[in-house]
Amino acid sequence: MKQLLLTTLMWLFSLTTFAQQKTNLAKLLFDEAPAKILQGIANVREGKMYDLTNMISYGIDSKGGLLFDRYAPPHIELLAYNDKVAGFAFRILTYSAQQEIKEYLEDHYALKLADSSRLGKQYGYTDSQVTIKFQTVPEAEFKQGRNGYLDIKTRTLTKAIAVQEERFKKAH
């Protein structure tokens, strides 16, 4: 009887641990299969980017299962290219979250101001591995319904998207 009770408790503990497992997007190595990141996440919407079978976008209502540092975006677009996670993007819904994300990015990357206006600022960063686009808005703009935005992609995906956009321009 003790063994059955112990086994049941261990099983319940493992379920709780699995349910609480969170993926921190800030720590992605961009070599994982999308299925590994999506494991245990319900209601994932999958769509081809540019009608290509090797460029996939997964729409995820994360409910806290996916984080960026300490921020839990309510909706994330996880991007895959050639069967590997190659990027993600999400809206930032509060000014305080925007400031936390900005602090994290400034601590880990040499963000550069790309554009500035009364409506907000655009920051960028590129190295041999990733391209980061970070859009901030003033605190008052959040109250008007605007959002910040973070978009991080591998250089490989960034280049592949640029090729597709150029093809689209030539076709139209």
Image: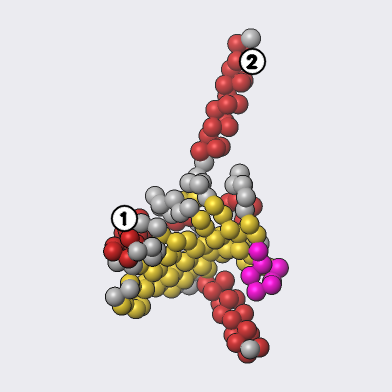
Residue 47 appears at what percent x and percent y? 65, 64
Asked if the magenta segment contains residue 143, the reply would be no
Mark 2 residue type: Leu
Vertical placement of residue 86 versus 171, above or below: above
Q: Residue at x 64, y 15 (%)?
A: 4
Residue 29: which disc?
none
In the picture as drawn, the residue positioned furthest to the right comes out as 53
Say few, some or many: other residues with alpha carbon within 10 Å of mark 2 (under 14 / 14 to 19 / 20 or more).
few
Tally the marks. 2
Q: Is residue 35 left or right of residue 67?
A: right
Secondary structure of residue under mark 2: helix
Label 2 belongs to which residue? 4
Q: Is residue 30 visible?
A: no
Contact flag, marks 1 and 2 (Cβ < 8 Å): no
Residue 8 appears at what percent x and percent y? 61, 21
Q: Is residue 51 left or right of residue 150?
A: right
Of marks 1 and 2, the one in the foreground? 1
Label 1 belongs to which residue? 96
Vertical placement of residue 75 versus 160, above or below: above
Q: Quadrant of residue 9?
A: top right
Majority SS type along the magenta span: strand
Q: Residue at x 63, y 57 (%)?
A: 45
User: Camera-side residue: 93 or 135?
Assistant: 93
Secondary structure of residue under mark 1: helix
Say few, some or many: other residues with alpha carbon within 10 Å of mark 1 (under 14 / 14 to 19 / 20 or more).
few
Vertical placement of residue 27 versus 3, above or below: below
Q: Residue at x 55, y 37 (%)?
A: 19
Write down the region rendered in magenta.
47-53
